[in-house]
Amino acid sequence: MKSLFNVGMIDRAARLLLGVFLFVLAFGILSGIGQIIAGGLGAIMLLTGAMGVCPIYRIFEIRTTGADSPAE
């Protein structure tokens, strides 16, 4: 059975940092449509980083976890 998680630790850390950065932009600097876009992308980055699952990675069968063994 395949593991649900497909986002590795370095990838997760980068997503979390980018999510926080986008949130700071959205709620501190930007306004209008830029604020909405940055806030939405920041939320997506924070969620995928916190959960360790990326739906786009799943579609393209990408794994950054390093667990490429056939047993999974």
Image (cartoon, grey):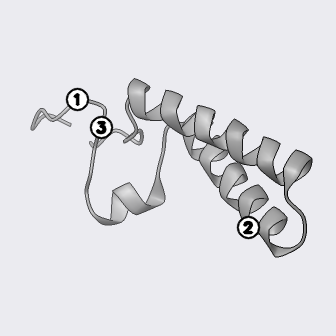
Report the label total: 3
Q: Residue at x 29, y 37 (%)?
A: 64
The label on residue 66 is: 1
Is mark 1 in CB contact (under 8 Å) with mark 2? no
The residue labelled by disc 3 is 64
As measured in the structure, the alpha-carbon distance from the residue carrying label 3 to the one carrying label 1 is 6 Å
Q: Earlier in the sequence, mark 1 or mark 2?
A: 2
Which quadrant of the structure image shows residue 35?
bottom right
Q: Along the horizontal axis of the image, is 24 left or right of 42?
A: right
> Toward the viewer: 38 or 40?
38
Q: Residue at x 86, y 50 (%)?
A: 29
Q: Along the horizontal axis of the image, is 6 left or right of 29?
A: left
Is mark 3 in CB contact (under 8 Å) with mark 1? yes
Q: Residue at x 41, y 62 (%)?
A: 56
Q: Position of residue 33 (x, y in %)?
A: 82, 74
The amino acid pointed to by label 3 is: Thr
> Toward the viewer: 64 or 22?
22
Mark 2 or 3, closer to the camera: 2
The amino acid pointed to by label 1 is: Gly
Please state, as top left, top right, bottom left or bottom right, where the N terminus lies in the image.
top left
Q: Position of residue 45 (x, y in %)?
A: 60, 47
> Toward the viewer: 53 or 31?
31
Q: Identify the element where label 3 is drawn.
A: loop
The residue labelled by disc 2 is 37
Please state, as top left, top right, bottom left or bottom right, where the C terminus lies in the image.
top left
Crowding near the residue tagged with mark 1, few <14, some 14–19, many ≥20 C-alpha atoms within 10 Å: few
The amino acid pointed to by label 2 is: Ile
Crowding near the residue tagged with mark 3, few <14, some 14–19, many ≥20 C-alpha atoms within 10 Å: some
As measured in the structure, the alpha-carbon distance from the residue carrying label 1 to the one carrying label 2 is 31 Å
